[in-house]
Amino acid sequence: MDERKLESLIRKCLSDFYERRLQKVSHLKLRAFLRRKNPYLFRALGIQKASDIVERLLTDYISASDETIFGNAFFEPIARISSVGKVSDAEGVDFVIETKNQITAVSLKSGPYIYNASQKKRQSQEFQAVRNRLYKLQKQFDPILGHAYGRVARKPSMDLFYRDASGQAFWQEITGDPDFYLKLIRLMKDEPAKHRKEYSPAWDAAVNKFTKEFIDEFCFANGNIDWEKLVRFVSEAEPQKMAKKSP
């Protein structure tokens, strides 16, 4: 891919990534992600400020989703477009690269350390299903579980129908450029700094908003955290609804 086109694509994908992050923050509900956290740990760490709890909650929540958002908004479209691939409608496959004699089906993940044994088995089954659909085309079928970074490389085995390709090797295979993996970071240039500057006010507003909600819900009138109320909110069983008697 021409470097100017790649730089433009990277800029667009970074913009999409930050837009999705903003949407994630703006649609959050305090009670929804507060229920998933450990109030005992916050108490044991000696945290006394509502804003500290809220900022930690937000940081943990957004950090956990960033890898997925970045993979979908940045890695996947760049890999597909730069390889001249086509979006796949098959479950478990992001895009396919078709040549005269071969069809390469790619499921792209950010990093190589995400699958447990059952997930690997399911991915293998999904690739098998795609091959069965394409059987009549009489082309060689090459399923790849790609990783945008890392060094993992595995060939198909008796247990797994697909192969793994990671980092430089993956990007070089689908683009033909041995330096493509370096261009991805080089051509970001100063775009992340620009987006971070735009993102910061939305983040600060979310911290302020949720801090107020937390104080209203889980603090005493004197400002101290009502730890028992917080624990009850996270852990107390909801009362069973009475079954309606039939007439």
Image: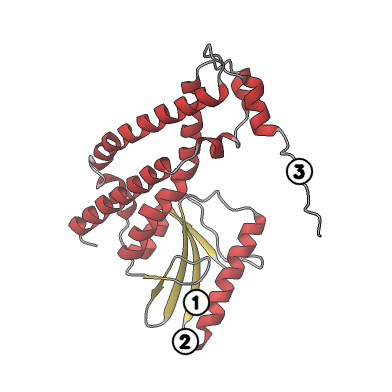
- Count neighbours of disc 3 (C-alpha within 10 A) and say few if under 14, some if 14 to 19, many if 20 or more: few
Mark 3 and mark 2 lie on one chain; the one further toward the N terminus is 2
Q: CA–CA distance between discs 1 and 3?
A: 54 Å
Q: Nearer the viewer, residue 86 or 195?
A: 195
The residue that mark 2 highlights is 137
Residue 154, given in percent of the width and then of the height, sits at 55, 59
6 displayed left or right of 73? left
Pick out the residue farthest to the front: 247
Q: Looking at the image, which residue is at 41% across and 57% down? A: 169
Q: Nearer the viewer, residue 53 or 72?
A: 53
Q: Looking at the image, which residue is at 29% across and 48% down? A: 15
Instruction: Kindly identify which numbered label has been placed on residue 100.
Output: none
Callout 3 secondary element: loop
Quarter of the view holding residue 189: top left
As drawn, 216 above or below 165: above
Q: Looking at the image, which residue is at 61% across and 69% down? A: 125
Residue 240, given in percent of the width and then of the height, sits at 76, 43
Circle 2: residue type: Leu
The residue that mark 1 highlights is 141
Circle 1: residue type: Phe
